[in-house]
Amino acid sequence: NAGVTQTPKFQVLKTGQSMTLQCAQDMNHNSMYWYRQDPGMGLRLIYYSASEGTTDKGEVPNGYNVSRLNKREFSLRLESAAPSQTSVYFCASSRGGAWPNEAFFGQGTRLTVV
Amino acid sequence: GDSVTQMEGPVTLSEEAFLTINCTYTATGYPSLFWYVQYPGEGLQLLLKATKADDKGSNKGFEATYRKETTSFHLEKGSVQVSDSAVYFCALSEMDSSYKLIFGSGTRLLVRP
């Protein structure tokens, strides 16, 4: 009963390095999301994919790219990491296409950029 | 755009006290409303939900009522336990084709024995 699986759980990057955060869900959900969580800021939407083959910018997309590889997988890429991207990143999925559109979350990736 | 506003924390209560965490929202349409809970070191879990005006969501002793006239969805619990210590997030999902979920900033609850 995996649900939403994120890898890695922890990562330290140097400024300017690149990396990809992986996310996979096994609930046959249509919609997937990437959020970042910062102290006092709640969860802010980076990118989302309402359905396979589509991606859209959220509230804070700058410095990130995403790929909806297939229905199960939605990756987030940092091309040139900056200290401002130090955060906890959460992937989520939801059924989409119907309401209520409740989301299921992964355990998070704690990223530190030094 | 759509937004969710929660009361700032932390909220500190003694065990068995009554809990209220305020949440108000702004939306262009008729959203679904949610409360999520995050325990330390974990992801978010759905606590309860409501999809239309006057709906009451409930789970684990927590309740929240969808109030369209005041655009609110306040979380309540009659008697909190130490195990309820967590961060609580109010969220909305607009009923359009984006299926976006918009979260509030979260309210940390600390329950003392």
Image: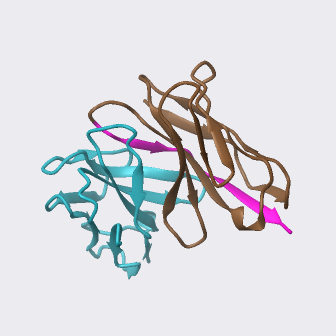
Chain colours: A cyan, B brown
Viewer-proximal residue among B64 and A111: B64
> Would residue B35 be found to the left or right of residue A4 on screen?
right
Residue at x-position 37% and y-position 43%: A101
> Would residue B7 be found to the left or right of residue B3 on screen?
right
Q: Which residues are magenta?
A: B98-113
Q: Is residue A61 above or below residue B6?
A: below
Residue B24 falls within the magenta-colored stretch = no
Would residue A61 be seen by someone viewing this image from the given angle?
A: no
Would residue A71 be seen by someone viewing this image from the given angle?
A: yes
Question: x%, y% of residue B67?
Answer: 61, 26
Question: x%, y% of residue A59?
Answer: 38, 44
Question: x%, y% of residue B7?
Answer: 69, 42
Residue at x-position 54% and y-position 24%: B53
Q: Is residue A35 above or below residue A1?
A: above
Residue at x-position 40% and y-position 66%: A106
Which of the image's four quarters has the N terminus of chain A? bottom left
